[in-house]
Image: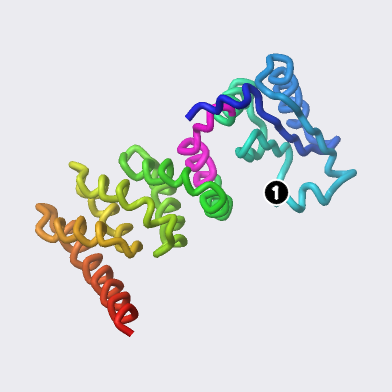
Amino acid sequence: MLNTEQSAIDATLLMTPGCSHCPVVLEALTRLIKSGKLGRLEIIDLTQYPSAGESAGVRSVPWTRIGPFELEGVHSHAELEQWAEHAIAGSGFDTYYTHLLETSRLNRVINLARERPSTLQDLVALLDTLETPMVVRIGVGAVLEELAESEALNDLVPGLIALTQSPDPQIRADGCHYLSLSDSPEALAAVRRLVEDADPEVRQIANESLAVLKAVSQVETDVDGL
């Protein structure tokens, strides 16, 4: 959704004097300031302010934050401009989550998902195509398991149910499994429909997921009856 309240975004660059790639990123960010894509640029020398890197969990420089997007390493002007445009529009979280999971930053994905639960829909969307790299699919699963039985995960149930209707059996199986992490009545109904799926692996996962959901439902019933 387009952010109509601002047409530019702020950025931060953490760098060190001895970094060979930092001037490349600095020059690109400066161009974005001149073009109006960035409203403000904060530049921090980590040799003078090491606490800035510690608080941000910086592993290497250059390190750039553009709106909600934290980027490590060297990035071209075109790449940084695209991230700035995403930040302005409030879009690009599917691309960003892919980037984070491909660079082994699972904890950042989990923290960002908790900070911005609305972006979890972008995460689930990555499961809807087999073109998504396996390392990313595994990472998405790890995030969803971290959010098991939470309100944030229950909000994703409609999207997960849509996965169970995919023509691809692997996607149906994934949707079925992740529905078992919720405690939604709608999830129970969707999983039950897959018990007689044409694919044997989907049927197996559906039966396993159904058992989990029934157990959760029974526990809730027992608690409500106390």
Give the residue drawn at x 28%, y 52%.
175
Q: Position of residue 38 (x, y in %)?
A: 69, 24
Q: Residue furthest bottom?
A: 226
Residue toward you, 160 or 131:
160
Give the residue at x 55% y 28%.
Answer: 3
* Residue marked by disc 1: 59
Q: Main secondary structure of the magenta part?
A: helix
Q: Nearer the viewer, residue 223 or 207?
A: 223
Q: Residue at x 61, y 39 (%)?
A: 68
* Residue 204 lies in the magenta stretch: no
**Is residue 170 found left or right of 16 in the rendered image?**
left
Image height of 104 relative to 94, above or below = below
Where residue 16 appears, x then y in whole percent?
A: 82, 38
Q: Is residue 32 left or right of residue 226?
A: right
Vertical order, 92 against 113 (above or below): above
**Picture coordinates of residue 117 (x, y %)?**
49, 49
Left of 152 or right of it: where is 46? right
Q: Quadrant of the C terminus?
A: bottom left
Hey, which quadrant is residue 123 in on the image?
top left
| 119 relative to 215, above or below | above
Residues packed near mark 1 inside 10 Å, few (<14), some (14 to 19) or many (20 plus): few
Amino acid of disc 1: Arg
Q: Quadrant of residue 165?
A: top left
Q: Residue furthest right?
A: 48
Residue 94 part of the magenta-drawn span: yes
Along the line of sight, the residue nearer the viewer: 29 or 165: 165
The region drawn magenta spans 88-102
